[in-house]
Image (spheres, grey):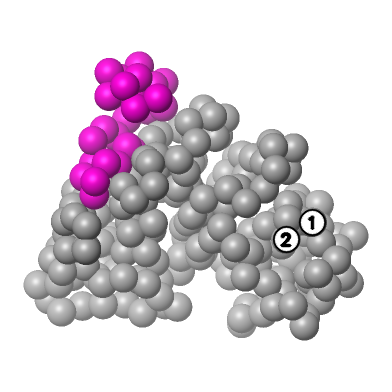
């Protein structure tokens, strides 16, 4: 369970989020550009500090402003996949995958490499990869750190439609077969329909709705937004 009760004053609005997210399956964070989606992700992974409130993952505090507690991003057991894969261009894929991994489990490595179908890419450099292949490597690198939670911040927005569909299939497979909870940020309702179990709708830094996907899709707010 991820318990979030935070506020953060931004240049354009005051961001507030007060809700608990089950650490099961895929939870989508949906909203237009500038609604606060990336702010939420960066509060969870520790790249942004809240002004007030707390965040707890499985009852372990990550930040608590009243107690002046702040766990550094690298100690949160949370991995983030961004829109840009952020691969090291001078390292081959295999080195990118294992970079920063302290205790590599060979069987886990093989499982993830095979699941993401990146075994043929291991000895290539990032410049030799397509956009979809780069993102699969970035996802693999994130998973090899053995996170308790995987955050994905619009990971498909730079890809063409065939690559988007391909990567959505991999993401859905990861959530089901590895049983790792994923918080998935997007502005695309079709991505939500394809892979998400729950969805939170943000607008101007406020949580508008949070429920099962099938329920939220019927909401009057979302019909207007679409």
Q: Which mark is residue 151?
A: none
Classify 19 as above or below 58.
above
Classify 58 as above or below 124.
above
Residues under numbered marks 1 and 2 in contact, where contact means CB atoms less than 8 Å apart: yes
- The quadrant of the rendering that contains the C terminus is top left
The residue to which callout 2 is attached is 134
State the residue in front, 143 or 120: 120
Left or right of 203 in this view: 30: right
What's the residue at 13%, 66% (across, down)? 52
Q: Residues within 10 Å of mark 2 (few under 14, many from 20)?
A: many
The reply to whether residue 178 is visible in this rendering is: no
What's the residue at 58%, 70% (across, down)? 145
The reply to whether residue 79 is visible in this rendering is: yes
What's the residue at 69%, 37% (across, down)? 161
Q: Residues within 10 Å of mark 1 (few under 14, many from 20)?
A: few
Residue situated furthest front in the rendering:
12
State the residue in front, 63 or 199: 199
Is 19 magenta? The answer is no
Question: Residue 216 placed where, x, y %?
Answer: 34, 24
Q: Magenta stretch: give its range.
A: 200-226
- Rounded to the nearest angstrom, the CA distance separating label 1 from label 2 is 6 Å
Residue situated furthest left in the rendering:
66
Where residue 146 sits, quadrant-wise, is bottom right
What's the residue at 73%, 52% (across, down)? 132
Left or right of 179 in this view: 126: right
Classify 10 as above or below 23.
below
Where residue 30 sits, quadrant-wise, is top left
Question: Residue 121 placed where, x, y %?
Answer: 86, 63
The local secondary structure at tag 2 comes to helix
The residue to which callout 1 is attached is 130
Is 216 magenta? The answer is yes
Question: Residue 19 placed where, x, y %?
Answer: 23, 45
């Amino acid at each position: 369970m991820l318990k979030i009760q935070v506020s953060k004053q931004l240049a354009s609005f005051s961001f507030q989020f007060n809700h608990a997210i089950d650490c099961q399956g895929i939870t989508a964070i949906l909203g237009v550009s500038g609604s606060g989606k990336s702010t939420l992700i960066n509060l969870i992974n520790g790249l942004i500090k809240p002004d007030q409130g707390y965040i707890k993952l499985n009852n372990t505090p990550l930040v608590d402003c009243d107690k002046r507690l702040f766990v550094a991003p690298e100690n949160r057991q949370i991995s983030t996949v961004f829109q840009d894969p952020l691969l090291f261009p001078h390292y081959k894929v295999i080195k990118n995958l294992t970079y920063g991994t302290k205790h590599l489990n060979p069987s886990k490595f093989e499982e993830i490499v095979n699941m993401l179908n990146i075994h043929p890419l291991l000895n290539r450099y990032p410049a030799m990869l397509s956009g979809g292949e780069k993102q699969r490597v970035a996802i693999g690198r994130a998973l090899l750190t053995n996170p308790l939670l995987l955050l994905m911040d619009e990971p498909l927005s730079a890809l063409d439609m065939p690559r988007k569909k391909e990567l959505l299939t991999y993401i859905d497979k990861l959530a089901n077969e590895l049983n790792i909870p994923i918080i998935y940020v997007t502005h695309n309702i079709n991505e939500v329909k394809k892979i998400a179990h729950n969805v939170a709708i943000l607008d101007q830094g406020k949580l508008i709705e949070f429920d099962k996907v099938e329920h939220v899709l019927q909401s009057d707010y979302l019909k207007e937004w679409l």
